[in-house]
Amino acid sequence: MPQTPEKTTTARSARAILLEKPKALALSTIGVRPFGSAPRQSMAAVLHGDEDERPGLNAKETAQLRGIRRFGATGAVLMAVGALGAGAQPVLQNPTAGLRVLSLPGRMPTVSLTMTMTGTVLVVLAWLMMGRFAVGDIRSRSGAPRRMTRSQLDRTLLLWILPLSVAPPMFSRDVYSYLAQSEIAARGLDPYAIGPKAALGVDHVLTRTVPTIWRDTPAPYGPFFLWLGRGISSLTGDNIVAGIFLHRLLALAGVALIVWAIPRLAKRCGVSAVSSLWLGAANPLLLFHLVAGIHNEALMLGLMLAGIEIALRAVEGSEPIRGQALFYLVAGSGLIALSSTVKIPSLLALGFVGMALARRWGGTWKALAGAAILLGIVAAVVTFVISVASGLGMGWINTLGTATAVRSWMSIPTLLGVGTGLAGVLLGLGDHTTAILTITRPIAYLVAMLITARMMISVYMGRIHPVGGLGIALGAIVLLFPVVQPWYLLWAILPLAAWATAPIFRIPAVVFTSIVSVMLMSNGAEYLPFMIVQAVIATILTAGTLIVFTRNSLPWRSDKPVAEITKGGPVDEDNSAGAYADSP
């Protein structure tokens, strides 16, 4: 029976609707709003708001800040002393072995563990209290009525870092892998083809201290880092203590770059330098894992953030990109590319700089292609020069997936796979964890790629600042990556600290930082359960006692509503500059 014209039109409309919905969904997924659709609140509006300058602290608050500084420094000293017995000490060449006083912590493991746990808790509590004077009430966007100065924060950060800078490695034994892989390179062997056990021998002093899981594993790090490590090995040889000291200097250099870059990026985003440094550089995860743990993320993130700041001087400037502006663009992009030869994830920052550059050049396809070609050439040249000059070649590209051998509970796809596999075992269905991971991990990769693409398009269309887009993309990659270590969270936290000010970001960031910071064992391994229980009980009692004794001198509770600003001029203990750092 032939259809009437009305039925034919209705059928065509239904088919059009069915075809249009997937198209609209696909476009909205990557951040492109279909023509004629209602506008939605942007990601930038949800996460970001400008922060204005505030007066300095009054006399009472300045005194409280000094108390917070000493409270945190006490915790850092306790961590450093406890690490003599509860740190990630080397199997051989332990410098405290046999010494009358310094070897005592090693003979009292429960006491040492208690000291490091207590110190960790004190530093985290001090950091949270300092947030009252750096950010104010993180539950609102109003900010602190008065804000500590940049110099006050710098001195506090320096005082907390110093004890951890001279302590044994803590929370991880990765630095021993750095030493072994660097020694392989120093011997003229290929660290990307052979592991410490085969290259150095199972009884070598450096191999003995490398965790067993990594003794047969080639180096997963870029050629620039191993080039620096080879230089360290040529100076220190098999001296573990000297090698650790020089690798920590590298980490501190990276931290210095982070401290330099974050306030300048924050100023570009309209965020207080002090609040960004509090959540970024003063973050306990950075203190515990980049300084005390000596992870090469410090160098990677420092170079990446410094490169972004320098590149944005050209991209966000008003002058034509030539001369000095072109130098800034190439130099900043080169630093980002250099950071990727430490660890590859930082290369993503170059994509966001490129999108901002394409928008600056007019936002056309031609501009996008030009930005991609220019920055691609810079990245290729830097990578090629480092790979060739170091003599290590391009073999590092084949070892980038080495870390996926570990199953991390902090990774969402891995947690889903392992949890589902465990449920199958409990139900008598067998262990299907590996099969489930082959499903969850590719899906997570796809979701991370879509989020990254959406952020890049948002930067290209001017909806979000490149620093914010990069932070969101790195956050998605970290949480959806097959392996997540606590210090990986800094990949996202540091750029977001310079841009995101909304409670929806700051509250989870602070809560997650506080919880994760106190969870790991200070020796980078495990303790017997009874020792952990004893140390936890002692830590709770000690920290509780200190809170009681300092209840009147430290701001454990707010005396006034956060929005209330007391009368009277501010008191700056050193008459330093205000909350914002200059960005030349």
Image (cartoon, rainbow, N blue to C red):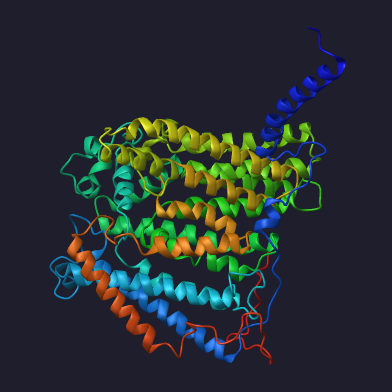
Please state the horizontal and vertical placement of residue 303, each as a whole percent of the image.
54, 52
Please state the horizontal and vertical placement of residue 33, each as a whole percent of the image.
75, 39
**Quarter residue 83 falls in:** bottom left
| Residue at 36% over, 30% down | 435
Please state the horizontal and vertical placement of residue 154, each as a whole percent of the image.
53, 73
| Residue at 69% over, 60% down | 269
Q: Is residue 382 left or right of residue 556?
A: right
Q: Camera-side residue: 36 or 8?
A: 8
Q: Is residue 393 above or below residue 310?
A: above
**Quarter residue 295 falls in:** bottom left
Q: Is residue 562 above or below residue 59?
A: above
Q: Camera-side residue: 512 or 77?
A: 512
Q: Is residue 317 left or right of residue 240?
A: right
Q: Camera-side residue: 518 or 235?
A: 518
Query: What is the count of numbered marks?
Result: 0
Whether residue 220 can be seen here:
no
Q: Is residue 209 left or right of residue 334?
A: left
**Quarter residue 78 falls in:** bottom left
Q: Residue furthest top?
A: 1
Q: Residue furthest right?
A: 5
Whether residue 144 can be seen here:
yes
Q: Quadrant of the N terminus?
A: top right
Please state the horizontal and vertical placement of residue 132, each as a whole percent of the image.
55, 77
| Residue at 79% over, 35% down | 364
